Image: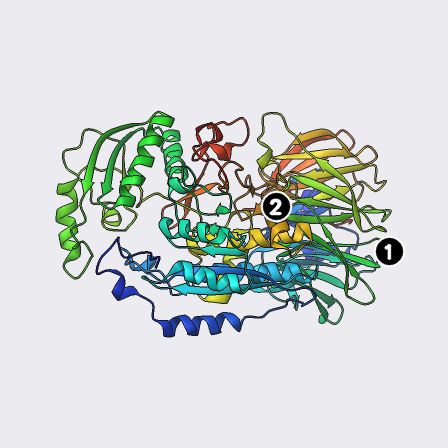
């Protein structure tokens, strides 16, 4: 049995877990959406092995919805089918919700028996790797929609594994470039006690070294399991956060590395010193923000809200992008053959428009999707990295993350 | 003359109307973020009036008789009709949801509207203000153009990345031509032989042969000192003799001047920020460009190929239409 989840946040996933009943209702809702596909050829099948694990968030506004990711994939499928209809192509999405302690490889095998070769997943890194390895025997390609782990793009990279999600290094570089552009180069790095937080802190350390910033102090915030805001929480955090951020040497900005939402959301306006917060709170790097309206973003937000009656979240954007990448490659090749679709996607002509002002393309050394990173404060998009002045001989997008000369990836 | 004109302009507009051919050369600019239209007197080269319209006004054009201004009020899901004489909104057209741009057949009717949120082109009979048809196209329909002979309508779709050819008689899509990423504007040459399609993210203009319905050429752009990704072609205009094309390059803040024979860029004219749509004055002396981020329009002297003036308008100017009289 191959399991995922469970190791990160004991006792927290139960309350926000999504019941099977919800998932079924959701599938029915999704299947009721208008489909305009024509059945000239067999449909191009896209599987989605989808995590049903939900973590609590510090802000109620960020609470993950039951259809997080699925909504984005569904809209992407709609867009694929509208385009495909004009070329006699059709696309189908096969949603496979998996709960913690589900055998993810069995879920993948289930898709394989249906002849599915293109599989999206928003599972964590260890599960992504299991899927990629198990899918190889079936000639499958796995699209990593959510796992930011750099190891997946480095020593654990795979030729049949496409990374739609930006890596931690890319996200940290996106924040770092902006802070350096602002000349806020003295950083106070505060990181959580979960393994992911330590990896994210490493990414910020790398960023500081690359771009000439200085981490003047570091502090570990241990997850003691009691930091959710409740009735008395406001008073508690008001007392605790200033005390815990006291005594740092002079710094320009506090960078929080807290992927599991334990403390970062409580930092802004509560730090001992009057300093801005970036990273896991304050100014956050993201693939999407519901306030993004540049480059036709308004249209996408409108289409999304009309279908799902909520705002489009980053995971929705990542899923939309993954499904659209398949649609775009199918449209350009005029083929419904997954092998031909993937060959085109990995070629030099491929690019996908995703409301970021430029085409997103694949890095051919680790199959990471090149992409601008939005920096959002929760109300507006503050900036978009890469920043002016961070130059690159091939594309400025490669100033974010692990570049070709540094890669440890050997694709096979 | 100038003083006389000023006096006339401050006088009651009704008197002006009674005198018949008394309009100054006037440009109308839709301001996407202000929900207004700026009325620009081209003799004075300044904005003389601002009209409140519906939400998110974008596409703008004049009816064939030039009596009315039509404007897509995208967020109000309607096209508003503004009487040029009174500058009052006198009616609306049933555009379908989120109309962005439109094109009139040369005869003045019907009107073809792209419904950006709805993957449709809506065909409207202007005199009766009725919908004649809705034609499904690609995702995020955008550019609209009608061939000079009125037989072919071209619609571009931004996310599907195609130019859709629609037959006038049958109102069916008869061909789909793949172009580069995010096609925005389609524009026929006056002789009808080609339709040019700008691709905002692809950074190119595709030249489509109208008869073959295939891409027969592609124009690339390069501006020294600018990253290629800020060169985002949008608006396209041809001189009446089809010899020269002007292409607005969005955040590159430039308009490219192209020899249509060689298909080479001859010059880049520096205009305002995020240059979007363009329109000639009827005598083709000037080309006006809307500059979304600098909130102005640039006036290009067509013969000299020089930018001679910028005129302040509202916020996020999107489209521009110029009246012949």
Where in the figure is residue B68, as x and y percent of width and height? 72, 59
At x 44%, y 64%, the residue is A96
Residue where numbered disc 1 is placed? B149
At x 39%, y 48%, the residue is A147
Residue A91, placed above or below residue B159: below
- Gap in angstroms between the C-alphas marked 2 and 1: 42 Å
Single out the mark in the foreground, 2 or 1.
2
| Label 1 environment density (alpha carbons within 10 Å; few <14, some 14–19, many ≥20) | few
Residue B23, placed above or below residue A218: below
Subunit under mark 2: A
At x 84%, y 35%, the residue is B261
Per the image, label 1 sits on a secondary structure element best described as loop
What's the coloring here? Answer: rainbow
Q: Is residue A162 visible?
A: yes
Residue where numbered disc 2 is placed? A343
Per the image, label 2 sits on a secondary structure element best described as helix
Where in the figure is residue B40, as x and y percent of width and height? 65, 45
The quadrant holding residue A175 is: top left
């Amino acid at each position: 049995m191959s399991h995922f989840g469970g190791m990160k946040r004991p006792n927290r996933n139960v309350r926000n877990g999504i019941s099977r009943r919800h998932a079924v209702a959701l599938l029915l809702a999704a299947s009721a959406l208008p489909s305009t596909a024509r059945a000239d050829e067999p449909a191009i099948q896209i599987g989605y092995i989808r995590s049903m694990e939900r973590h609590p968030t510090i802000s109620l506004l960020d609470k993950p919805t039951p259809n997080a990711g699925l909504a984005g994939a569904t809209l992407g499928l709609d867009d694929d089918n509208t385009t495909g209809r004009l070329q006699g192509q059709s696309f189908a999405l096969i949603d496979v919700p998996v709960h913690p302690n589900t055998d993810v490889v069995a879920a993948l095998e289930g898709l394989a028996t249906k002849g599915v070769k293109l599989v999206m997943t928003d599972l964590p890194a260890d599960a992504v790797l299991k899927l990629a390895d198990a899918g190889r025997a079936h000639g499958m390609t796995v699209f990593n929609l959510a796992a930011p782990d750099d190891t997946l793009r480095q020593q654990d990279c795979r030729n049949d594994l496409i990374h739609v999600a930006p890596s931690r290094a890319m996200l940290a570089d996106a924040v770092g470039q902006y802070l350096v552009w602002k000349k806020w180069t003295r950083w106070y790095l505060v990181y959580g006690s979960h393994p992911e937080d330590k990896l994210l802190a490493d990414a910020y350390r790398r960023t500081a070294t690359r771009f000439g910033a200085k981490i003047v102090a570091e502090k570990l915030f241990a997850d003691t399991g009691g930091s959710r805001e409740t009735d008395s929480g406001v008073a508690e955090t008001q007392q605790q956060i200033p005390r815990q951020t006291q005594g740092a040497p002079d710094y320009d900005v506090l960078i929080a590395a807290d992927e599991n939402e334990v403390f970062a959301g409580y930092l802004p306006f509560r730090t001992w010193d009057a300093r801005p917060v970036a990273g896991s709170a304050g100014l956050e790097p993201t693939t999407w923000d519901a306030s993004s309206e540049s480059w036709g973003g308004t249209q996408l937000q409108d289409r999304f809200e009309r279908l799902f009656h909520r705002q489009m979240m980053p995971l929705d954007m990542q899923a939309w992008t993954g499904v659209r990448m398949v649609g775009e490659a199918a449209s350009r090749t005029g083929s419904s053959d997954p092998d031909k679709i993937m060959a085109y996607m990995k070629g030099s002509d491929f690019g996908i428009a995703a409301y970021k002002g430029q085409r997103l393309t694949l890095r051919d050394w680790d199959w990471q999707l090149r992409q601008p990173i939005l920096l959002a404060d929760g109300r507006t998009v503050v900036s978009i990295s890469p920043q002016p002045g961070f130059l690159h001989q091939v594309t400025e997008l490669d100033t974010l993350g692990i570049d070709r000369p540094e890669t440890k990836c050997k694709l096979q | 003359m100038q003083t006389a004109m000023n006096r006339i302009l401050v006088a009651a507009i009704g008197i002006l109307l009674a005198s018949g051919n008394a309009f100054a050369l006037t440009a109308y600019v839709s301001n996407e973020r202000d929900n207004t239209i700026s009325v620009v007197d081209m003799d004075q080269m300044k904005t003389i009036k601002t009209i409140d319209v519906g939400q998110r006004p974008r596409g703008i054009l004049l009816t064939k008789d030039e009596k009315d201004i039509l404007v897509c009020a995208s967020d109000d899901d309607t096209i508003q009709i503004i009487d040029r004489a009174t500058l009052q909104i006198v009616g609306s057209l049933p555009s379908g949801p989120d109309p962005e741009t439109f094109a009139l057949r040369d005869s003045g009717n019907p009107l073809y509207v792209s419904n950006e949120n709805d993957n449709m082109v809506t065909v409207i009979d202007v005199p009766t203000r009725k919908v004649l048809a809705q034609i499904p196209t690609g995702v995020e329909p955008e550019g609209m153009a009608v061939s000079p002979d009125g037989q072919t309508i071209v619609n571009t779709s931004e996310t599907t990345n195609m130019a859709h050819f629609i037959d006038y008689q049958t109102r069916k899509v008869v061909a789909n031509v793949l172009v580069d990423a995010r096609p925005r504007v389609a524009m026929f040459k006056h002789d009808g032989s080609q339709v040019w399609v700008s691709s905002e993210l692809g950074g190119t203009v595709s030249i489509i042969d109208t008869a073959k319905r295939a891409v027969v050429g592609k124009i690339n752009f390069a501006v020294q000192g600018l990253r290629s990704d800020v060169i985002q072609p949008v608006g396209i205009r041809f001189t009446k003799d089809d010899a020269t094309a002007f292409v607005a390059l969005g955040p590159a803040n430039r308009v490219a001047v192209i020899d249509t024979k060689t298909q080479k860029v001859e010059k880049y004219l520096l205009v305002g920020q995020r240059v979007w749509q363009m329109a000639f004055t009827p005598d083709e002396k000037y080309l006006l460009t809307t500059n979304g981020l600098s909130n102005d329009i640039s006036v290009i002297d067509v013969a000299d190929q020089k930018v001679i003036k910028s005129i302040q308008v509202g916020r996020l100017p999107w489209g521009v239409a110029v009246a012949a009289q």
